[in-house]
Image (tube, rainbow, N blue to C red):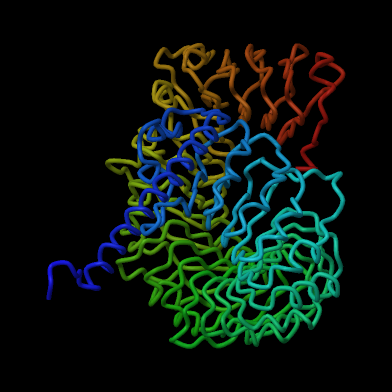
Amino acid sequence: MSSGHRNPITFFLIFIVFLLRFRSFSWTQTSHSQCIDLLELKKGFLFSYATTSLPSWLTGTDCCTWEGLTCEEASGLVVFLDLSERNISGKIMPFLFNITSLQRLNIAHNSFDESPLLEIRNLGNLTHLNLSNSGVIDQVPMDISLLRKLVSLDLSWSGWNTESPPLDLRKLIGGLSNLKELYLDGVNVSANGTQWCSVISESVPKLEALSLVGCSLTGPIDSSLSKLRNLSLLRLDDNDLSSEVPEFFEDFYSLNVLTLSNCKLQGFFPKRVFQLKNLKYIDILHNDELSGYLPDFLKDSTLESLIISSTNFSGSLSDSLGNLESLMDLDLSGCHFSGSIPWLFRNLSQLVYVDLSSNNVTGEIPVILGGIWISEILLSNNNLTGSVPESFSQLNHLVTLDLQENFLSGSIPASLFTLPALQELQLSENEFSGQLEEFLNGSSVLQVVDLGNNNLLGEIPKSMFDLLGLQSLVLSSNNFTVTIELDLFRNFRNLKYLDLSSNNLSVSDGTGDASLLFPSLAESPGFASGLLLIRKSMGATSIGPVGVSMSVLAIALMGVCVSALASSDDLTLQPLWASKSFPSEGPSFGGANRLPLRHGRLWQDSMKSSYARKPVISPEAT
């Protein structure tokens, strides 16, 4: 071939290289202009913390490397802007709407100034838009209806202008036929069941996630909603539906999440909903007119959270609950369930939270077999018997143990006080007996201990006074008989509530003085307890100044109350137990709102006026 004739393939390759270089130059210019627009956008922002100030957004750098931004690899154009949860305030400048390549925009959970977002229609390539809790709007911008490519829309906001007119739902979503996710929590929709159900099912038939929490919706739930067969998430909490749950909910086979709490639901809940194969989370709490029974659960259930608290559900707690091997949260409290719970810790190794309180649960608390990560066990106000299993000593992640108001007996395991994560121990109003044992390495995070109204006796363990994080200690109505050294209470620098009443205790300050004063307690920052203070062999007992942050005082007096409680203006509750009448110059309880008396007499006509103004509860009333 002659050198004067070029190979056509060579010309073609040269042409392709030229085009690529030209397009690369063109893209660079477009990307550069977007970087400029983003820097102008940033100028309207106000930052609270250095960590959220977008330090990587700098002039002369490639904006595709900036935090919160994602660029399309081929074109170099910005397709995703994520500024969510950065505590940004200030303004959304109109430069944002020049970035027409955006496919995803998320500015949720910030504190921007209100802006009408008039040019949001320019972002016609958006598929995902999240303006939730951003503060940027006080009304839904209707131009969103022009964003025909939207697949996900979140306009949830807890601070909508209550004076704004209700949202025209049809106008907003009527043209968004591709929408698969719609979140409008807190938006005032104010529509009845026929209206909102039909508009949604007709306008967005591909919907997979629907969240309308607190939207001022009313019922009944219309049958048109049954057309949304692809729903995987349905949240209608905090609406006045005042209707039954339709049986067609049993046909939402793709449902993963269903929440209908506080909706004033009525009638019987469709039992087969619990057995939906893909269901992982169900919450129907606070519907006290909603009745129903739990089904027999199969082993292949994927259920992770079962929450039906404060409903009218009843029946026996079936052993099949033990088949829910994926279960992490179980809340059946405040219902009418009965039966025993041997299944509770047997197979539920994923369990983190269990609340069966305020039912008619009987039998013993089952032994824990180990390997469980549970953080809260709430079994109060039932008819449980037996003792606290020693296996509870293995619960290193337990934060709350509430077994009060049962018929539990035996001794209280000392190991409970040493659980490393335990913050609250509620064992009151049971039949525990015997002496509390000393323990080593008490929990440093334990804040609440309530052992009141049991049959405990003997000494209060000195190791109890090493629980330095205690804020509330209740040992009342037991049979403790011991002299407590006053110095022990100096450790309780966070204590706000102390009740040792209805025991047979004495307090010694180590001096033998018949008048037991408490100036040292006033010197303990944050100490806020009323302790008492009796020594049977002494005649009178008096109380000196206590911490100014004291809010609750519960005292058992064997003698006569003769002191003025010098720093008691913050007191809000004073149960005083006395065997004799109060003196004419009684204490001035400036902040007290009621005065219960037990085993004593109050002569109001001899009290100071500030004291006598307080409502009095007679011994008979208490």
Where is residue 615 drawn, in percent x and y?
A: 83, 30
Q: Quadrant of the N terminus?
A: bottom left
User: Relative to 421, is 350 above or below?
Assistant: below
Q: Residue at x 85, y 46 (%)?
A: 164
Apparent side of residue 455 relative to residue 26 in the rendered image (left or right): right
**Of residues 329 and 81, the one drawn nearer to the viewer in this rendering:** 81
Residue 612 on image: x %, y %: 83, 21
Depth order, front residue of 72/394: 72
Residue ID at (51%, 29%): 47
Q: Is residue 333 left or right of residue 588?
A: left
Q: Residue at x 39, y 25 (%)?
A: 491
Quadrant location of residue 53? top left
Q: How many marks?
A: 0
Q: Residue at x 51, y 24 (%)?
A: 535
Task: Name the quadrant of the C terminus.
Answer: top right
Measured as percent of width and height from the top left, residue 352 is found at 44, 62
Between 91 and 415, the one lying in front of the other is 91
Q: Where 383 sits versus 68, above or below?
A: below
Q: In x, y percent, where is residue 119?
A: 68, 46
Which of the 4 image quarters holds residue 250? bottom right
For residue 345, what is the image quadrant? bottom left
Answer above or below: position of 65 versus 265. above
The residue lying toward the viewer, choosing from 513 and 371, is: 371
